[in-house]
């Protein structure tokens, strides 16, 4: 294990697993801000996908500079930069809106352009120069060479290998802006990101987020999932946009659901004494669930990058984290607070799940 960072002075350690989900990633910003402000938790490692990966590398950059307060400042700067792109040409504005929305929406003034990108033409035709404003956002905030050299926090970024269909995990010592862009590469909006000759698409297809690196690469048993995509949604979607919305939600939760099932299976074997704790980590799973509070916003909200809206999402995330810490802080290091079977089964409920038995 790497040495502890001098900035970390908390009482307990936790690893974070951050979902992607367009502009709703500002909810995760709020969660991180509250954890950093609280000061009782040291962050051992972060695994993230898409917007979750962006939050992860921005937090790491801020920690390198000025500790917890530096991380809070950098996260705020990054999300503010997302909102300040009104001067971009309409097609480029449309590209960044399509990423932070990630779903086709009737309310988007650039919908004809986005429809052409998403349904009638390839990004290789519509965007032959491969313009990606996200690159500028990230490079404005993150010095990747410094992040690579940081040994005090472990980072894992997930992308999907286009050719093999497998998940790819990029680790902190090798992270570049291209790895994060690969994790956020929606294939009908951006050209595949090629790294060492291998093409990659959005990591959400195979791991949103990928949890398994935290078992193999860290020794911290407590894992917090910050979830922003709903598992359950009542009612039958009927419009084309509603159908696509729901398909994306199901797809981008699929790999995580499979991992939760596997974790529950192994935990039960460990608890029954059929697997040795010397050979298998017995993780304590936790979740701050933004899926339920974010349902109050209509589908068009995923496209919004208005600063006031991003601040609102941040505040909701911050409140959710503070509430979770008030109720569950003492459980960290002792037991899980996420009922895994309820989380992945057909009986799964939204909101805070029942604590699992020790």
Image: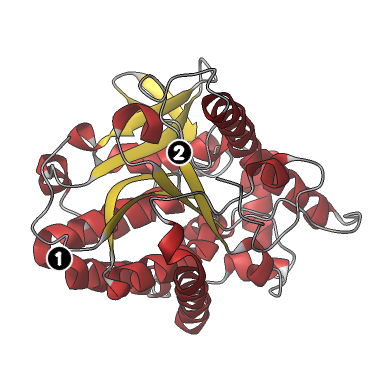
How is colour applied across the structure in the image? Answer: secondary structure
Residue found 75% across the figure and 44% down from its top: 247
Q: What distance separates the C-alpha of mark 1 from that of mark 2?
A: 27 Å
**Horizontal and vertical percent for residue 116?**
66, 48
Task: Classify 308 as above or below 64.
Answer: below
Residue 340 found in image quarter? top right
Residue 195 found in image quarter? top left
In the figure, is residue 163 to the left or right of 104? left
**Horizontal and vertical percent for residue 277?**
41, 25
Q: Nearer the viewer, residue 141 or 261?
A: 261
Residue 7 found in image quarter? bottom left
Location of the N terminus (image quadrant):
top left
> Is residue 94 at all visible to an observer of this figure?
no
Location of the C terminus (image quadrant):
top right
Residue, disc 2:
283
**Horizontal and vertical percent for residue 5?**
12, 53
Residue found 49% across the figure and 71% down from its top: 317
What number is the disc on residue 67?
A: 1
Q: Nearer the viewer, residue 328 or 203?
A: 328
């Amino acid at each position: 294990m790497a040495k502890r960072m001098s900035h970390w002075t908390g009482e307990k350690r936790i690893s974070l697993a951050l979902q992607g989900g367009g502009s709703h990633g500002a909810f995760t910003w709020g969660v991180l801000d509250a954890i950093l402000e609280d000061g009782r938790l040291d962050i051992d490692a972060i695994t993230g996908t898409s917007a979750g990966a962006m939050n992860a590398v921005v937090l790491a950059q801020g920690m390198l500079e000025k500790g917890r307060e530096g991380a809070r400042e950098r996260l705020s700067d990054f999300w503010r930069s997302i909102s300040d792109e009104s001067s971009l040409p309409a097609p480029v504005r449309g590209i960044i809106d399509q990423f932070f929305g990630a779903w086709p929406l009737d309310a988007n003034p650039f919908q004809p352009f986005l429809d052409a990108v998403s349904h009638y033409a390839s990004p290789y035709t519509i965007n032959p120069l491969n313009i990606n404003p996200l690159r500028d956002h990230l490079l404005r905030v993150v010095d990747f060479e410094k992040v690579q050299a940081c040994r005090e926090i472990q980072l894992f970024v997930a992308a999907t290998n286009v050719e093999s269909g497998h998940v790819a995990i990029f680790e902190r010592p090798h992270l570049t802006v291209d790895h994060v862009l690969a994790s956020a590469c929606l294939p009908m909006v951006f050209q595949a990101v090629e790294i060492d000759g291998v093409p990659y698409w959005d990591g959400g297809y195979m791991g949103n987020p990928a949890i398994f690196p935290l078992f193999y690469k860290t020794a911290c048993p407590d894992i917090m999932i910050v979830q922003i995509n709903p598992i359950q949604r009542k009612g039958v979607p009927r419009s084309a946009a509603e159908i696509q919305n729901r398909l994306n939600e199901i797809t981008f939760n699929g790999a995580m659901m499979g991992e939760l099932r596997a974790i529950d299976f192994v935990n039960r074997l460990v608890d029954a004494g059929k697997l040795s704790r010397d050979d298998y980590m017995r993780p304590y799973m936790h979740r701050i669930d933004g899926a339920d509070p974010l349902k109050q916003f209509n589908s068009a909200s995923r496209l919004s990058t208005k600063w006031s809206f991003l601040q609102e999402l941040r505040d909701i995330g911050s409140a959710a984290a503070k509430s979770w810490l008030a109720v569950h802080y003492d459980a960290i290091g002792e037991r899980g607070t996420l009922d895994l079977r309820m989380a992945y089964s057909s009986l799964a409920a939204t909101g805070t799940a029942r604590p699992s038995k020790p």
